[in-house]
Image: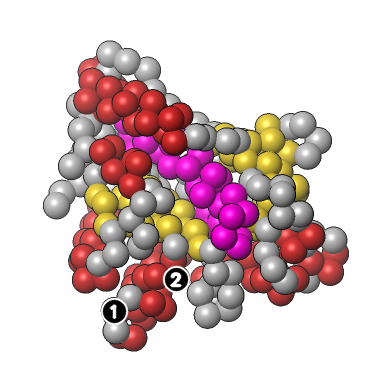
Amino acid sequence: MKLRKKREPDTVPVAGLSIYDPVHLGMFADGEGVNIELIYRNILMAGEPGAGKSVGLNNVVAHGALCPDVSLWLFDGKQVELGLWREVADVFVGPDIELALQRMEALQAEMDRRYDELDRVRRRKITHTDPIDVVMLVVDELALFSVTMGSKDQQEQFVRILRDLVARGRAAGVIVVAATQRPSADIIPTSLRDLFGYRVAYRCTTDSSSDIILGRGWASQGYNAATIAPEERGVAYLLAEGGIPRRMKSAMLTDADIYGLVDYAQHIRTSGGHSAA
């Protein structure tokens, strides 16, 4: 398993997005588009089953898939949520904690290698001019890897490496996208949550679950995902670094839309010299 270098700029015959472009997630309640800069940041998405978390997650994955400068690493404990994107993933891990740990350790080693190189050339971070992919690590159903599958030692090791990637990965070109339908303190401890620059809270069952995602005290100030009606699928509160939560609705992608995007992404990546493993 090896990370690929980014395609050379003069060899791309078709247009694609870039991870340095804003990621479109949907629309705010006031009609403004939700476009976030994900490069050098991480994003956490959580909410109860059926709240629309997968809809929001697919928008992020779609952007990564359409970027020839992204190496897409998908971890899906249920295997079917991200399975539609498998053909354009450089790494795909299903319900296999041992394989998950192997891949996480490999990514951690790659992050360290990149920092060694940045230190050597006296640079602070990777930029769009560097001939190397940004890695988008997507972990769907975090709870399956952190508290359900494998031994307690394996679960703790997974969380340790994930926390390290979230804490240190940004400048090295590693973006972490994590999602769970179990927003509880054992799944999303404060020490991990606070490392995410973006947090998206879909409908939750309790005020405390909403605060576990967004941060303590937001629910009492009126930013409470527990007040989102069950029929408002895809509606969430988005908290960005240094801001206040804003109510938004995720853009909808059907399975048919995803299949079409996968075909287009394969064309872009193959034409650009980047094919999935």
Q: Which residues are magenta?
A: 41-70
- Residue 160, placed above or below residue 51: below
Q: Amino acid at mark 1?
A: Gly
Q: In which quarter of the view is residue 45 placed?
A: bottom right
Q: Which residue is mark 2?
A: 143
- Find out whether residue 28 is within the magenta segment: no
Q: Position of residue 88 (x, y in %)?
A: 28, 37
Residue drawn 51% across the image and 63% down it? 180
- The circle on residue 159 is none
Q: Residues within 10 Å of mark 1 (few under 14, many from 20)?
A: some
Earlier residue among tags 1 and 2: 2
Judge the density around disc 2: few (<14), some (14-19), many (≥20) Cα neighbours within 10 Å: many
Q: Tell me if residue 125 comes above or below residue 254 in the rendering.
A: below
The numbered disc on residue 150 is 1
Mark 1: secondary structure: loop
- Image location of residue 68, percent across then percent down: 32, 30
Q: Which sits in the foreground, 232 or 215?
A: 232
Residue type at tag 2: Ala
Foreground residue, 71 or 258? 258
Q: Is residue 240 visible?
A: yes
**CA gap, disc 1 and disc 2:** 12 Å
Q: Give the colouring mode of the picture.
A: secondary structure
State left or right for residue 231 relative to residue 170: right
